[in-house]
Amino acid sequence: MRELVVLGTASQVPTRTRNHNGYLLRWDGAGLLFDPGEGTQRQLTLAGVPASAITRICLTHVHGDHCFGLPGVLSRLALDGVEHPVHLHYPASGEEVVRALVSVGAIPPDLRLHPHGVAGDVADGLAVVPLRHRVETYGYRLTEPDGRTLLPERLEAAGVRGPDVARLQRDGGLDGVRLADVSVRRPGQRFAIVMDTARCEGAEELADGADLLLVECTFADELAHLAEEYRHLTAGQAGALGATGGARSVVLTHFSSRYPDVGPLLQEARARAGARPVAAAEDLDRFAFPARRAARDAAAGAAPGVAPDAAATGAPA
């Protein structure tokens, strides 16, 4: 299962219909909880997601609407007797705040703290990139390694059948047949979250090639001066970020309480996002990942003599 479960979509002030931030990414057997604001424990219950699904908690920064739900989540993990390790990632400058929040909650049996202060990988496939906000802030990117898609007609032409197929995949070659000869590159899927930030290179880096981009959308374009002052994105800037980064789908969130109707924000974002789908998240929405990129179709249209890797363009299906 790979899906994004939206637990809250409000920015600084929650509303009658929007809880504070909270986003659970279900990624195969892992569950990454991003920015648990107030009420996240209850939102998990409303979403039908058990606390045991959480394996990592990732804070973009330590402003309250992104982390004040942490004690409740940790207490729930402890109450439910979750035995697997739970990894908590956060900016190093927020150490004092994070430890205070952890101290007032019941601590799960195996809570592992991971402060980070520079860009780069913080776990297998999980990287952080600095953003431009009023405090130290990072976006997160989760990337699946590229794989290979086997092409049955090439396997048949090479005489590779039955158990030999598994051996070829395991060893990368069999009796003179290379795996690259009978397959094409399958681009790994990529998720990115861009929370509180003004426009910056880090946001563009995170959005680059994302299959699903979750991005803040605090203000309408007419309030671009406020967005810059408080280091946030407007709706149009959020949509443009998806376009320049080549994201395949964009989900907007983190709406100011001044907008009871976010329809106009959605329109502004779509106007700048090109042809890619853009959605305005509501609390408890679920978003599935787009279908995998069509590496096989790209290879089918390649000119003769082009190696499969070179032919696989990674174009969206």
Image (spheres, rainbow, N blue to C red):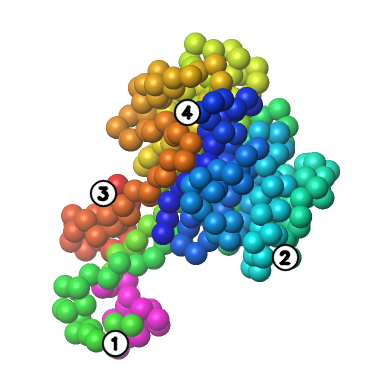
Residue 164: numbered disc? 1
The answer to whether the residue labelled 1 contacts the one labelled 2, judged by CB atoms less than 8 Å apart, is no
Residue 282, percent from left and from top: 45, 34
Q: Is residue 203 left or right of residue 271?
A: right
How far apart are the two marked residues, 1 and 3, measured between alpha carbons?
Answer: 30 Å
Secondary structure beneath dot 1 equals helix
Reading the image, the residue beneath label 4 is 238
Towards the viewer: 302 or 192: 192
Residue 75, percent from left and from top: 71, 53
How far apart are the two marked residues, 2 and 3, measured between alpha carbons?
Answer: 41 Å
Of mark 1 and mark 3, the one earlier in the sequence is 1
Residue 317: numbered disc? 3
The residue shown at (38%, 57%) is 187
Secondary structure beneath dot 2 equals loop
Check disc 2 and give the amino acid type. Answer: Asp
Of mark 2 and mark 3, the one earlier in the sequence is 2
Q: Which residues are magenta?
A: 167-182
Reading the image, the residue beneath label 2 is 110
Secondary structure beneath dot 3 equals loop
Of mark 4 and mark 3, the one earlier in the sequence is 4
Number of other residues with Cα within 10 Å of mark 4, as a class: few under 14, some 14 to 19, many 20 or more: many
The residue shown at (29%, 82%) is 165
Of mark 4 and mark 1, the one earlier in the sequence is 1
Of mark 1 and mark 2, the one earlier in the sequence is 2
